[in-house]
Image (tube, grey):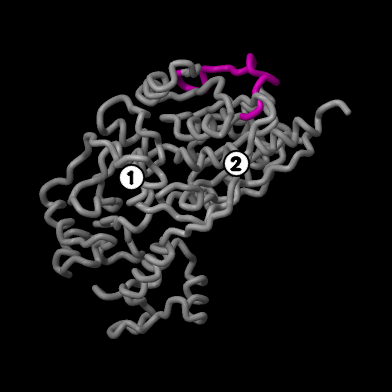
Amino acid sequence: MKDFYTLAETSELFGKCKETLRRWDKEGILNAVREPVSNYRVYRKSDVQNLLGGLFEEIVDDNVSNYAEPENDYSVLELFAGAGGLAIGLENAGLKCIALNEIDKWACDTLRKNRPNWNVLEGDIKDFTFTEYRNKVDVVTGGFPCQAFSYAGKKLGLQDARGTLFYEFARVIQEVNPAICIGENVRGLLSHDKGKTLQGMISILDEIGYKVVPVEVLKAIKYRVPQKRERLILVGIRKDINAKYSYPKPHRKIFNLEDALKKGSLYNCDVPKSDGAKYPEYKKKVLDMVPPKGYWRDLPEDIQKEYMGGSYYLGGGKTGMARRIGWDEPSLTLTCSPAQKQTERCHPDETRPFTVREYARIQTFPDDWSFSGSVAQQYKQIGNAVPVNLGEEIGFSVIKFLNEYYSLSKPK
């Protein structure tokens, strides 16, 4: 179906559920047609690309601002800090990182090299206690990995989560007693173990004295990030606090790859030159045939079958495979390895993965933020990071909450 996208592929390209596409069909926004052979509902590529282009056009009038000025000095303890994407964002918003814990030695070196004044606690979180920060930290944050729990009864308690990194996250919150805690994770946490894992986390935070705000998945493209990345945000408020937390409002303006890599409103210069991975020769020959915004469906059918192997016959759109990004669209979510099969993010003009500095730009790191280790280690650090601008927007929302909390708690 070289000229058509399937329903699943179109859903993935727009980031919309299939029901939304069916509604668009009824409303005449994007009309489906019947594929000549299978009679399945499909979409003309030209119609999809035209609408995608329209969705990503610059909207000049973007009146949304989440900016908030801190009315006090607010401090953050960050766990699972990685290469500092969230920490830089929170710092840019006006919060002070007083300590950061990370196990990866290269990421720790990155943090120290760029912020010599930060207190970087290198090593396994299990080996640290944080009682010295009790009642001295306003916020505890952490991008803990998603792990299944062992259930010992109907309601999961803190002890049942022992051995998982969420247990360590909750333990530190219990030790430090911050006003607010923020966990971030992949969207898949919503459905992990049929939703039981997330419910377990919520019940554990409840047990240690924190009320969880309704969980939301934030789309990075709505927060000044030129990338279709999604992060689940888990916010807990200490139960003795009456102040209300609100997620940052989404912006209407969408930034694209050109905004990321060229001089414009996001950056004041073109992306600096840097090292980058290369495709193996066989993959380069295949990707040479893919146009900007195209993917494996744009290849001749015999090459599709050869390149895709068994995946060719499986369901799903697989729109990340043999994918070349277009200048006028945001990047797909970056991974930890830019040249791996099934998640290609090929440069629009050159048949190569994005370089290290291009990767960093797409994640909205500043150009002067350098990464330690081999090129592979640098890609891994950047691919795992929270986009800096998304971190800043979350930071503003935390500052608004803390401003209200401290104003309410002042003696009358």
* Pair 2/1: label in front: 1
What residue do we see at 22% from left, 62% from top?
291
What residue do we see at 81% from left, 34% from top?
408
Disc number at residue 67? 2
Q: Residue 282: image x %, image y %?
A: 11, 52
Q: Residue 389: image x %, image y %?
A: 48, 41
Amino acid type of disc 1? Lys
- Residue 178 in the image: above or below residue 248: above
Residue at numbered disc 1: 263
The stretch in magenta equals 122-139
Instruction: Tell me: 269 left or right of 304.
Output: right
Circle 2: element type: loop
Decide whether residue 325 is among the magenta residues.
no
What residue do we see at 31% from left, 46% from top?
262
The alpha-carbon separation of the residues under discs 2 and 1 comes to 24 Å
Q: Residue 87: image x %, image y %?
A: 50, 30
Q: Residue 360: image x %, image y %?
A: 35, 38
- Of residue 38 and residue 7, the one placed in the foreground of this image is 7
Report if the CB atoms under discs 2 and 1 are less than 8 Å apart.
Answer: no
